[in-house]
Image (cartoon, rainbow, N blue to C red):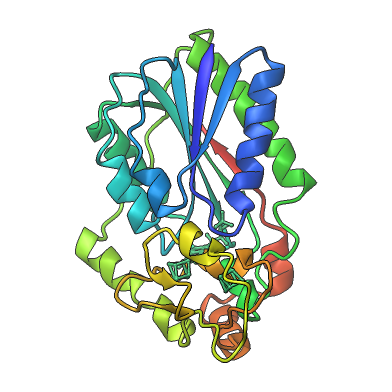
Amino acid sequence: MKVLILYFSATGNTRKIAKVIGDTFTQMGCEVAMSDITANADRQKKIDLKPYHAVVFGAPIHSWRAPRVVREWMRTLDGQGKKCSMFFTYGGFGVHPTHYSTRLLLENQNFIVVSSADFLGCHTFNLGGWKAMEGRPDKSDFNVAKKYAKTTYKRFTGEDNGILGALEKTNHTEEQLDSIESFRFNVLTQLPTRGENECSMCLVCEELCPTGAMDAESGKADKGKCIACLACVANCPENVLKINDMSKSWSFKVEMEKTTEASMRGQKSRIYL
Ligand SMILES: Cc1cc2nc3c(=O)[nH]c(=O)nc-3n(C[C@H](O)[C@H](O)[C@H](O)COP(=O)(O)O)c2cc1C
Ligand code: SF4
Ligand code: SF4
């Protein structure tokens, strides 16, 4: 069985889980192709799904949904009635309604969604001083990923004929969810910038940017295009791209969510069947 794993990963969490899922499928005798769709250029390539029996989609959760660019890209796909599975990584806060809305989107594109899962991952804003889910994904999350791949394999082969069960609906409209997206810029008040720092002009930041917002020459991100994913900051080999200190907003976030770092650490990755 040939399986295609398509994943978006700005700072590496989703990539780590995708790898565990891919390795598990391979151990089960599948031929696995992995495709990273994070960079803008990667999402422009036409994907031919014909050779594949089934597809796995992986993405981080950005403000309760798959990132905007991932949703836009999914709307260009033709599922050809193939089975697919989804998974998400998130920083320990809101998940809902990501599974529900992404499933609807994929079904509209003629995919049959057979399973889903969410995995804990260190929050992107830890790069600015947050402390959410440090060290995740870890062994416990990778074990759930292995189990998820094994269960999904049975659904792909037909040994288990089930599909993904009913998911909790959302009362939020797309417009309300769109407006929630803008909160990220109350936290990320200084977009990635090189400032006065010198660098080797390797262009990694510009090439990896999912939206074309980063200009390596000026070392600045375009506010109109930036989605605050921090791929540029996390992957700059010289660590010269800077953002604001977010530690104050971390205390505020923990208070607002009525949680603590300790209780957050107790959360577990989950499989949805
Ligand atoms: C703009 C933005 C919005 C985010 N929104 C959420 C969220 O709604 N809930 C949550 O728990 N984590 C949220 N996160 C954290 C990411 O989902 C998490 O760190 C994820 O594992 C990053 O995956 P990656 O390393 O593959 O990019 C957000 C991160 C960013 C950058
Ligand atoms: S990734 Fe870093 S080193 Fe490379 S061009 Fe961008 S700022 Fe310069
Ligand atoms: S410029 Fe913005 S969108 Fe581009 S990689 Fe950096 S944080 Fe992400």
* Image quadrant assignment for residue 173: bottom left
* Image quadrant assignment for residue 111: top left
Q: Position of residue 218 (x, y in %)?
A: 45, 81
Q: Residue at x 38, y 71 (%)?
A: 226
Asked whether 269 or 39 is in front, the reply is 39
* Image quadrant assignment for residue 136: bottom right
Q: Position of residue 79 (x, y in %)?
A: 30, 25
Q: Looking at the figure, which quarter contains the N terminus?
A: top right
Q: Position of residue 9 (x, y in %)?
A: 54, 52
On screen, residue 154 versus residue 214, left or right, reads right
Asked whether 95 or 82 is in front, the reply is 82
Can you name the residue that lies furthest to the front here? 200
Q: Residue at x 74, y 70 (%)?
A: 262
Asked whether 114 or 172 is in front, the reply is 114
Q: Is residue 144 above or below residue 98?
A: above
On screen, residue 9 versus residue 185, left or right, reads right
Q: Is residue 111 above or below residue 239?
A: above
Q: Position of residue 10 (x, y in %)?
A: 53, 58
Residue 66 in sight:
no
Q: Residue at x 37, y 61 (%)?
A: 211
